[in-house]
Image (cartoon, helix red, strand yellow):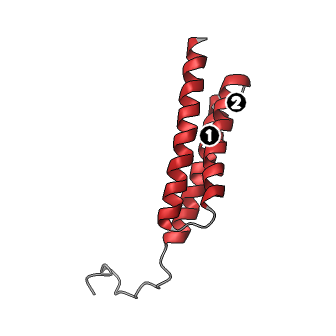
Amino acid sequence: MVLDTLVAVFGLATTVGLFAWTYRDANRVAVSRPWLWAVAVAGAFAVGVLMYLFASVPTTGVIMTANTGLVLYGFEREVVNESDESAEPTEPGTLPDQK
């Protein structure tokens, strides 16, 4: 009973923290729809916590569900930050900065 209470308190605090962090980071990096990404990250984590508390689900399922929003946001963040410049061709066996 005490463990469930600790998990619930930790889950609530972390959900709020993830929402705030994701929204702030999405605005900083200029990811479109920061509210949507913040809800997706925090919502997936909250569903994972609720699954742990109220459903008899394997732990791997809980972990995967809780991490889904963060993983998807990470992919979106990478796409937004990647450069459109093509890499310059180099000679075989050399690094791009060695030419």
Report the side of 24 relative to 72 (left or right): left
Q: Residue at x 68, y 37 (%)?
A: 47
Residue 76, image x, y percentages: 58, 63
> Which numbered tag is attached to residue 45?
1
Residue 19, image x, y percentages: 57, 47
Label 2 Cα neighbours within 10 Å, binned few <14 / some 14-19 / many ≥20:
some
Looking at the rendering, in which quadrant would you find the C terminus? bottom left
Query: Mark 1 belongs to which amino acid?
Result: Phe
Q: Residue at x 47, y 63 (%)?
A: 28
> In this view of the protein, which residue sits in the foreground, 61 or 70?
70
Q: Is residue 64 visible?
A: no
Dots 2, 1 in contact, CB < 8 A: no
Reading the chain from its start, which is encountered first: label 2 or label 1?
1
- Can you say whether 78 is above or below 4 in the image? below
Q: Which SS class for mark 1? A: helix
> In this view of the protein, which residue sits in the foreground, 85 or 50?
50
> In this view of the protein, which residue sits in the foreground, 94 or 75?
75
Residue 24, image x, y percentages: 50, 56
Report the side of 36 relative to 20 (left or right): right
The residue to which callout 2 is attached is: 51
Query: Mark 2 belongs to which amino acid?
Result: Met
> Which numbered tag is attached to residue 60?
none
Label 1 Cα neighbours within 10 Å, binned few <14 / some 14-19 / many ≥20:
many
> In this view of the protein, which residue sits in the foreground, 13 or 97?
13
